[in-house]
């Protein structure tokens, strides 16, 4: 979702090791619809190349007051840039840059743009822990806040010096979240807790083999991504998958079996506002798991199966004020089976898709869904990306 659509952002990069994170930040801004103009100090070029940033931002990178155009000097107009931007972000902001900002020391193009800016200014400090903790740095940060700037916190962890503590620049996704929140103070899911299950479950036959399915987890992770973009706090219970997602508002709980998923659902469900069961849970598991690998020559004459724990039924039975959404992947009588599941599991809505639809189902990056609400109204959608499907699902949930 383009939560930064049409926004103009000046990204000021000063000379610290954390500058290596800025290409990911530029890409994230652009992906969310922003236009980005990078201004960097000369020393910042020691840590990240202008070519990389220009390629990702699709704008020339500025670092000096003038540039050469066919042997003619051209002025890089810092005043125009300061008026152009909807937001200026200085990341990383080194201790030297912080000092210059406090005292108005206009010794490079970045500082000239900062002093000319009429827009909100965000500052993402980055330095070693003793430098960050020094009284002069803390005083500078406090002073910059009194100027009306938004000073972001620092992260804690291993630093370039080898020491561990406070001083790391926030991760790109954390900075992105702060900027998105600034431009979208009324995010539709802000303050809401969303529980999402994703991926397959593996039910062990022996220490090596299992019963499972072809779920990739892509749909569940797409739902989590969109929920985060809409401001939610997301709790993602994930079966085995190659999908990755990181966000300050996200907690991931890796699980393997249906019983592990059931345990996590029981511990989290009562505290959430919305629950979406997108996981492809194995319906059956072996009644007895062999303690050792079953040898091929020994064979298996009979594999006795027993039903797995039904997390969705549990949530439907114990539902209070939560909105509960299920998924139905069907191969026959699709609409009839989905409506039956909606009723039997006490759901507020169900997402139906069919393996007969090309580009839909397991392992694909696309899906073709129909959303059925509690009044049995069916909203059919064409084939689209799973992120677009996730957006449509949340729009349907909000309409409930």
Image (cartoon, helix red, strand yellow):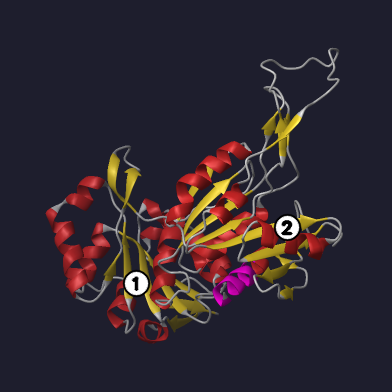
Count of number-bearing discs: 2
Tell which of 238 and 174 is nearer to you: 238
Picture coordinates of residue 197, whole percent (x, y): 59, 51
| Element type at mark 2 | strand
CB atoms at circles 1 and 2 under 8 Å apart? no
Q: Which mark is residue 110?
A: 1
| Quarter of the N terminus within the rendering | bottom right
Does the image show residue 30? yes
Q: Point out which mark residue 328 bears.
A: 2
Which residue is rendered at x = 72% and y = 47% of the image?
Answer: 215
Question: Could you say which quadrant of the image residue 33 lies in?
Answer: bottom right
Of badges 1 and 2, nearer the viewer stands 2
The range drawn in magenta is 390-399
* In the image: residue 176, left or right of residue 212: left
Alpha carbons under labels 1 and 2: distance apart? 54 Å
Q: Residues within 10 Å of mark 1 (few under 14, many from 20)?
A: many
Which residue occupies the foreground of this view, 342 or 89?
342
Q: Image quadrant of residue 304?
A: top right
Report the side of 400 relative to 21 (left or right): right
Q: Position of residue 193 (x, y in %)?
A: 45, 60
Of residues 305 and 108, which is closer to you in this image? Answer: 305
* Residue that appears at 72% across and 75% down: 379
């Amino acid at each position: 979702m383009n939560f930064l659509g049409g926004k103009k952002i000046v990204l000021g990069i000063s000379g610290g090791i954390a500058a290596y994170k800025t290409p990911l930040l530029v890409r994230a801004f652009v992906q969310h619809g922003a236009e980005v103009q990078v201004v960097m100090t000369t020393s910042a070029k020691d840590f990240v190349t202008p070519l990389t940033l220009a390629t990702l931002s699709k704008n020339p990178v500025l670092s000096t007051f003038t540039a050469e155009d066919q042997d003619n000097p051209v002025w890089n107009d810092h005043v125009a840039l300061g008026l152009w931007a909807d937001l200026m972000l200085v990341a990383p902001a080194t201790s030297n840059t912080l000092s210059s900002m406090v005292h108005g020391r206009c010794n490079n193009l970045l500082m000239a743009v900062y002093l000319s800016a009429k827009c909100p200014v965000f500052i993402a400090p980055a330095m070693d822990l003793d430098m960050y903790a020094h009284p002069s740095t803390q005083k500078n940060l406090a002073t910059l806040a009194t100027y009306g700037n938004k000073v972001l916190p620092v992260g804690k962890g291993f630093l370039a010096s080898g020491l561990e503590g406070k001083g790391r620049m926030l991760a790109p996704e954390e900075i992105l979240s702060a900027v998105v929140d600034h431009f979208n103070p009324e995010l539709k899911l802000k303050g809401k807790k969303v529980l999402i299950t994703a991926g397959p479950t593996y039910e062990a036959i022996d220490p090596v083999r299992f019963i499972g399915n072809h779920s990739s987890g892509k749909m569940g992770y797409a739902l989590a991504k969109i929920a985060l973009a809409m401001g939610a706090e997301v709790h993602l219970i994930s079966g085995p998958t190659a999908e990755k997602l990181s966000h300050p508002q996200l907690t991931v709980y890796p699980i393997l079996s249906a019983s592990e998923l059931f345990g996590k659902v029981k511990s989290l469900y009562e505290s959430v506002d919305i629950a979406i069961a997108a996981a492809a849970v194995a319906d059956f598991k072996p009644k007895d798991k062999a303690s050792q690998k079953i040898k091929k020559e020994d064979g298996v004459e009979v594999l006795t199966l027993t039903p797995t724990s039904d997390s969705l039924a549990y949530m439907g039975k114990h539902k209070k004020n939560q909105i509960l959404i299920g998924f139905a992947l069907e191969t026959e009588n699709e609409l009839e089976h989905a409506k039956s599941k909606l009723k039997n599991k006490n759901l507020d809505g169900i997402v139906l898709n069919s393996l007969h639809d090309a580009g839909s189902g397991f392992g694909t990056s696309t899906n073709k869904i129909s959303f059925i609400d509690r009044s049995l109204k069916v909203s059919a959608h064409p084939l689209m990306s799973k992120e677009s499907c996730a957006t449509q699902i949340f729009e349907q949930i909000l309409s409930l």
